[in-house]
Image (cartoon, rainbow, N blue to C red):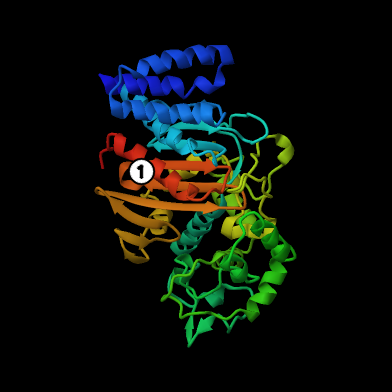
């Protein structure tokens, strides 16, 4: 009974930030009295939420909207709401965080949750239509487009990938071993992290100044300069042997997709993913005047610039939880041969492996695919439980230490509380 009362109270308290101060004060008095009737464990959960609501001064409100006809019982929906509220409240109790938007997808149903603010300067609750940088989650879009090319026999996983590039690149081989799609998609190509090289900047990063240094170094690069200077790159290891994270590797995949489909990369993403899924708020360019683009912040709480347009296939997309929920619904359909290939293991096994861009693991019998990312001022995370037809989108407007991992923990914590879907 104490647990049921605690869950009900948590749902009430998470909406408290949106009411007037007198009402809030009265409600808090009632809430504090309420905790006397709760078990010690539940009381601790309530205090976490109080910190999130009052200590940070952020509004906390849940928006839950089924995408289609409800397939869950009322009890299951309440369980989902309570679980998300508890996990999000713990996340928001860290004063470094600013805002958080979540989408929970279960089969045909999507529920949206929003906390905190779109800005540190103005209390403005985000919504399912708030636009964030999705950062390196963009790589999964690049990967699924590459999977489509493989299913259509325009590309193959293990052949010499240089044949798909717009110019000859004899330098993109190590001791006779060329780069392949498999090695590029799993960050084992031997390519450096970035072009131009940024290893010196990441060696001893000043997180408040690093974005501006990266922008200064990268701002003069467009497609033609990337392709020109790609001739000067030397692989650091034999493709397929050593894992080194590479944004450049994703851009190389993007250049090749342009060749095999004879169209610009941004057009390919729009025609093959965004338009079929009706993702109208997603793209490589966002009009800030629309007022839906949130503000991003560093771990020091400073406002950060947005990424450059040339981030492209590596981390160039903007999106909302409403749009990303549609993408997740597609990603949960492994009967689609493109999705099936994108989720197929390329290295190791299901306990600790890599698919075509996605990371793969198994916890308590559930297969998990995930990919996160961070720009200068925002963090993203998408977590899939494909066997359970369940997926999560989490977007935050901060780059605090541990944000990406904490958002993955939210998805896993909520998943544990929900009844598994029949396989």
Which percent across, then down, holds residue 204?
Answer: 58, 65
Across and down, in percent, residue 109 comes to 41, 32
Q: Which residue occupies the foreground of this view, 55 or 264?
A: 55
Viewer can see residue 180: yes
Instruction: Tell me: 419 left or right of 280.
Output: left
Q: Nearer the viewer, residue 261 or 404?
A: 404
> Where residue 412 sits: x, y (%)?
36, 43
Q: Quadrant of residue 167?
A: bottom right
Q: Quadrant of the C terminus?
A: top left
Q: Is residue 74 left or right of residue 261?
A: left
Q: Is residue 128 above or below residue 27?
A: below
Question: Around disc 1, counting alpha carbons within 10 Å, would you say few (fewer than 14), some (14 to 19), or many (20 or more)?
Answer: some
**Quadrant of res 420:** top left
Circle 1 SS class: helix
User: Can you say whether 132 is above or below 344 in the image?
Assistant: above
Residue at image position (42%, 46%) is 408
Quarter of the image where the N terminus is located: top left
Q: Which residue is mark 1?
A: 412
**Residue, far bottom:** 175
Residue shown at the point (45%, 14%) measured from the top left: 29
Q: Position of residue 122 (x, y in %)?
A: 67, 31
Q: Is residue 71 visible?
A: no
In this image, 386 relative to 126: left or right?
left
Give the tally of numbered discs.
Answer: 1
Residue at point 46%, 77% (across, down): 239
Q: Residue at x 39, y 42 (%)?
A: 411
């Amino acid at each position: 009974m104490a647990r049921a009362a605690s869950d009900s109270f948590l749902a009430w308290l998470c909406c408290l930030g949106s009411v007037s101060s007198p009402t809030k004060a009265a409600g808090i008095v009632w809430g504090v009295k309420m905790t006397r009737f709760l078990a010690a464990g539940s009381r601790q959960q309530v205090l976490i939420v109080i910190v999130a609501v009052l200590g940070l001064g952020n509004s906390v409100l849940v928006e839950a909207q089924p995408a289609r006809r409800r397939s869950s019982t009322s009890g299951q929906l309440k369980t989902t709401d309570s679980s998300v509220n508890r996990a999000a409240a713990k996340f928001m109790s860290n004063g470094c965080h600013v805002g958080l938007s979540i989408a929970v997808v279960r089969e045909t149903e999507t529920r949206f949750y929003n906390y905190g603010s779109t800005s540190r300067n103005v209390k403005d609750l985000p919504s399912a239509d708030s636009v964030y940088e999705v950062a390196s989650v963009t790589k999964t879009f690049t990967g699924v487009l590459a999977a489509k090319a493989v299913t259509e026999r325009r590309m193959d996983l293990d052949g010499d990938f240089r044949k798909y590039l717009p110019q000859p690149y004899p330098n993109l081989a190590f001791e006779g071993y060329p780069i392949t799609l498999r090695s590029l998609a799993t960050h084992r190509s031997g390519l450096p992290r970035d072009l131009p090289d940024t290893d010196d900047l990441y060696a001893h990063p000043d997180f408040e100044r690093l974005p501006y240094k990266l922008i200064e170094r990268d701002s003069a690069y467009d497609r033609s300069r990337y392709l020109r200077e790609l001739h000067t790159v030397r692989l650091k290891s034999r493709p397929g042997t050593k894992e080194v994270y590479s944004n450049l590797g994703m851009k190389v995949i993007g250049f090749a997709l342009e060749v095999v489909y004879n169209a610009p990369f941004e057009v390919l993403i729009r025609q093959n993913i965004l338009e079929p899924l009706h993702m109208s708020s997603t793209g490589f360019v966002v009009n800030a005047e629309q007022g839906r683009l949130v503000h991003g912040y560093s771990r020091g709480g400073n406002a950060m610039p947005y990424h450059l347009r040339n981030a492209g296939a590596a981390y160039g997309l903007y999106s909302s939880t409403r749009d990303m929920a549609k993408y997740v619904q597609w990603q949960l359909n492994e009967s689609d041969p493109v999705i099936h290939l994108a989720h197929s293991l390329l290295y190791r096994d299901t306990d600790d492996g890599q698919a075509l861009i996605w990371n793969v693991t198994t916890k308590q019998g559930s297969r998990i695919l995930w990919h996160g990312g961070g720009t200068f001022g925002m963090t993203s995370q998408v977590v899939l439980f494909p066997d359970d037809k369940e997926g999560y989108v989490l977007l935050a407007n901060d780059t605090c230490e541990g944000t990406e991992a904490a958002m993955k923990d939210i998805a896993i914590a909520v998943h544990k509380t929900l009844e598994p879907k029949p396989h």
